[in-house]
Amino acid sequence: MIALVDYGAGNLTSVRKALAALGARFWTPATAAELEAATAVIVPGVGHFSATAALDDTWRAAILEAIERSVPLLGICVGLQWLFEGSTEAPGVAGLGVMRGICRRLPDRSSGAEGQTIKVPHVGWNSLALPRVTRLLAGVPEGAQVYFTHSYAAPLVSATAARTTYGTTFSAAVEDGLIAGVQFHPEKSGDVGLRILRNWVRDYAD
């Protein structure tokens, strides 16, 4: 059963609705110790990276132990950023560190293709560039549109499964073995988002 982690910053309602629409079995653990029963873990998140400080040493240890037991982990939005070492949004708050690199603020006032001002936060639909084939994004076409809402983003790394450009190019999705994350909100990204969640539930969480 999927453990949907609630640390006070996740968009849990929409994620729950999407998982229910897929017929996935999930629950929200009250304590980190309950992760021992999880067959997969989702860490969602919206807002400021500092909220991830609520995932204290007990939660971090439980999630890392789950990874050691080959339990799949999916981060969504701030949950993806938390997979990295940290973010300049909250320099004193460490990420989980299973991905190398620091998340940084998207640049303001970058000139777009037609000279338009690019505003931060990045809110709305944007396309995915797919540098490699992954299980998470199986069946998702090059240029597929998904929904973003964020001001900070993860760097491009060897685990980058999809990238998006908005002022700068960043990791829109990462996948390394059983660890995956998406910067966009699949639960708000229509059929493409549901396909990605379905891929993850089918391949990792069943």
Image (cartoon, rainbow, N blue to C red):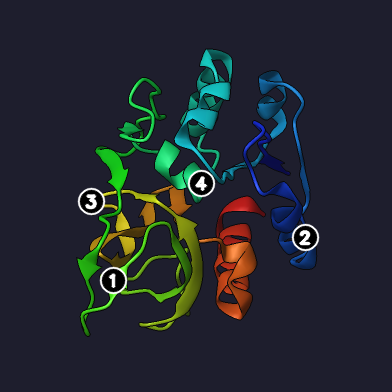
Question: Which three-letter amino acid code belongs to the residue tagged 1?
Answer: Thr
Query: Are discs 1 and 2 less than 8 Å apart at CB?
Result: no
State which quarter of the image contains the C terminus.
bottom right
Residue beneath label 3, please? 157
Ranked by sequence position, the earlier of labels 1 and 3 is 1
Does residue 146 lie above or below 24 as drawn? below
Mark 3: which secondary structure?
A: loop
Where does the image place residue 199, in percent across and percent down from the top left?
Answer: 56, 66
Mark linked to residue 76: none
Residue beneath label 4, please? 75
Query: Are discs 1 and 3 less than 8 Å apart at CB?
Result: no
Mark 2: which secondary structure?
A: helix
Ranked by sequence position, the earlier of labels 1 and 2 is 2
Ranked by sequence position, the earlier of labels 3 and 2 is 2
Query: Are discs 4 and 1 less than 8 Å apart at CB?
Result: no
- Mark 3, residues whose alpha carbon is within 10 Å: few (<14), some, or many (≥20)? few
Residue beneath label 1, please? 117
Mark linked to residue 17: 2
Mark 1: which secondary structure?
A: strand
Ranked by sequence position, the earlier of labels 3 and 4 is 4
- Residue at 47% x, 29% y is 68
Which label sits in the foreground, 4 or 1? 1
Instruction: Report how far apart the C-alphas of labels 3 and 2 lie in the structure.
Output: 31 Å
Question: Which three-letter amino acid code belongs to the residue tagged 2?
Answer: Lys
